Image (cartoon, rainbow, N blue to C red):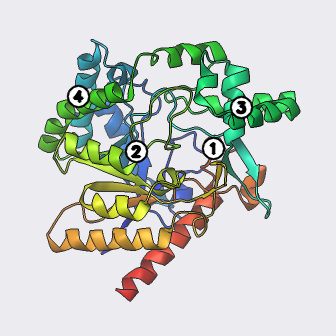
């Protein structure tokens, strides 16, 4: 009995091939049909073709032993998040996609409910002392972008005077290339977009949330869950929400999957095991107010998928993605709690006792430093190092129990 070591694969254009993945110690593939526009139905034909590509992948004539286990992500259309009158149409499409996934034997579906951006970093090539590169979020740089590049109306109200001063200092000494790199880094996080948005396009997307409060966004998520979870129960789909990344508000728009209280609200919105959580240690650990062990133990029976990484949080709230054995998240203890939950499920004959986990991002190391990595944070060698560390920890934990 073990957890299910998994690996995110972005498809045929990923620099890490299925043959590469077969060598890293993962058997579960985490994947999505990225070529289908957000909200459109994932057809049976599209799913079946991609599943066949993964599950039947051969190396030297032998099956590689890979299986498509988790969807990440089946994105939620913006009209649902905004609560527009068209939301029911998009929800019906979402249910159709869930039906087709279940028909093809895929029963774990990750999603998020982040408005506009589904992750935000300010530096995609932050160099560590050992020469490796990682992702970084700098608080002053975000404020500088918001105040002086985006020039969002009323943005000064969202920052303390000290933060505005630091943003001014950042902007004053930054070169044009640094400002452009910051802009490109932030706009990388728009889901379903293959090209960077312009600043004006980004402003339009943000403006759609001008009148959406935290309470309204919560209500829209609850409506979505009450609409889809009954179908998940019938189809055997475990839907699991991914926390906000980072877990606090940005650019004046609310975030509602950031804290213990947020998760508790979501789990209580629909009391069903099919309404679950993607436990992302990296996202949760980016806020010092989050008690990761409390979140994991409280909602353990509803955790259907885990992202295991850690961040180093700086004094001002900035952070960078640390190695899997360092940073604020105690991955050894968190992994132990997941193993205990997996064992408990096995004892009560739950079919989902092998909780899938993946190393979630990785430093750019060694030969990968000279390669073009099309999906930031998803270099091969850094993730392989992280997965090896996680699998080693799981082995040690199981021998200790």
Residue topped by disc 2: 242
Q: Does residue 163 appear in the picture of this structure?
A: yes
Of 246 and 348, the residue lying toward us = 246
Helix, strand or loop for disc 4 = helix
Asked if residue 108 lies left or right of residue 208, the reply is left
Q: CA distance from mark 2 to mark 1?
A: 18 Å
Q: Does residue 27 appear in the picture of this structure?
A: no
**Image point 28% across, 69% down: which residue?**
342
Tell which tag, 1 or 3, sits nearer the viewer: 3
Residue topped by disc 4: 223
Helix, strand or loop for disc 1 = loop
Residue topped by disc 3: 164
Pick whichever of labels 2 and 4 is earlier in the sequence.
4
x and y, in percent, of residue 297 in the image: 31, 64
Above or below residue 88? Residue 159 is below
Q: CA distance from mark 4 to mark 3?
A: 37 Å
Write down the quadrant of residue 347 in the picture.
Answer: bottom left
Residue topped by disc 1: 376
Q: CA distance from mark 1 to mark 3?
A: 29 Å
Residue furthest out toward the bottom: 400
For the residue carrying disc 2, how many other residues have a C-alpha within 10 Å: few (<14), some (14-19), or many (20+)?
A: many
Which quadrant is home to the C terminus? bottom left
Tell which tag, 2 or 3, sits nearer the viewer: 3
């Amino acid at each position: 009995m073990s957890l299910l070591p998994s690996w995110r694969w972005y498809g045929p254009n990923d620099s890490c091939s299925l043959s590469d993945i077969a060598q890293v110690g993962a058997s579960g593939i985490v994947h999505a049909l990225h070529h289908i526009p957000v909200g459109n139905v994932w057809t049976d034909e599209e799913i079946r073709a991609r599943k066949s590509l993964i599950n039947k992948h051969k190396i030297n004539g032998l099956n590689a032993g890979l299986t498509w286990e988790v969807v990440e992500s089946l994105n939620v259309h913006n009209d649902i998040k905004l609560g527009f009158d068209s939301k029911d149409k998009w929800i019906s499409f979402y249910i159709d996609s869930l039906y087709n996934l279940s028909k093809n034997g895929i029963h774990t579906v990750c999603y998020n409910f982040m408005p506009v951006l589904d992750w935000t970093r300010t530096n995609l090539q932050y160099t560590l002392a050992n020469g490796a590169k990682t992702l970084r979020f700098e608080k002053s740089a975000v404020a500088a972008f918001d105040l002086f590049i985006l020039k969002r109306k009323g943005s000064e109200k969202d920052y303390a005077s000290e933060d505005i001063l630091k943003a001014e200092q950042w902007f004053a000494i930054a070169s044009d290339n640094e400002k452009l790199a910051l802009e490109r880094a932030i706009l990388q996080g728009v889901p379903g977009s293959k090209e960077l948005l312009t600043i004006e396009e980004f402003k339009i997307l943000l403006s759609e949330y001008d009148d959406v409060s935290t309470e309204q966004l919560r209500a829209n998520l609850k409506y979505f869950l009450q609409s889809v979870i009954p179908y998940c129960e019938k189809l055997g789909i475990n839907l699991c929400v991914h926390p906000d990344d980072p877990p606090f508000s940005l650019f004046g728009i609310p975030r509602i999957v950031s804290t213990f209280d947020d998760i508790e609200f979501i789990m209580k919105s629909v009391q069903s095991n099919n309404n679950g959580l993607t436990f992302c240690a990296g996202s949760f650990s980016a806020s010092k107010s989050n008690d990761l062990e409390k979140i994991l133990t409280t909602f353990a029976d509803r955790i259907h998928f885990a992202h295991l990484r850690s961040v180093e949080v700086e004094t001002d709230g900035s952070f960078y993605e640390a190695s899997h054995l360092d940073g604020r998240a105690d991955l050894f203890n968190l992994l132990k709690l997941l193993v205990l939950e997996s064992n408990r499920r096995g004892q009560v004959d739950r079919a989902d006792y092998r909780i899938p986990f993946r190393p979630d991002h990785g430093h750019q190391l060694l030969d990968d430093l000279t390669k073009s990595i099309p999906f930031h944070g998803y270099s091969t060698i850094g993730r392989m190092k992280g997965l090896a560390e996680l699998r080693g920890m799981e082995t040690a934990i199981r021998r200790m129990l």
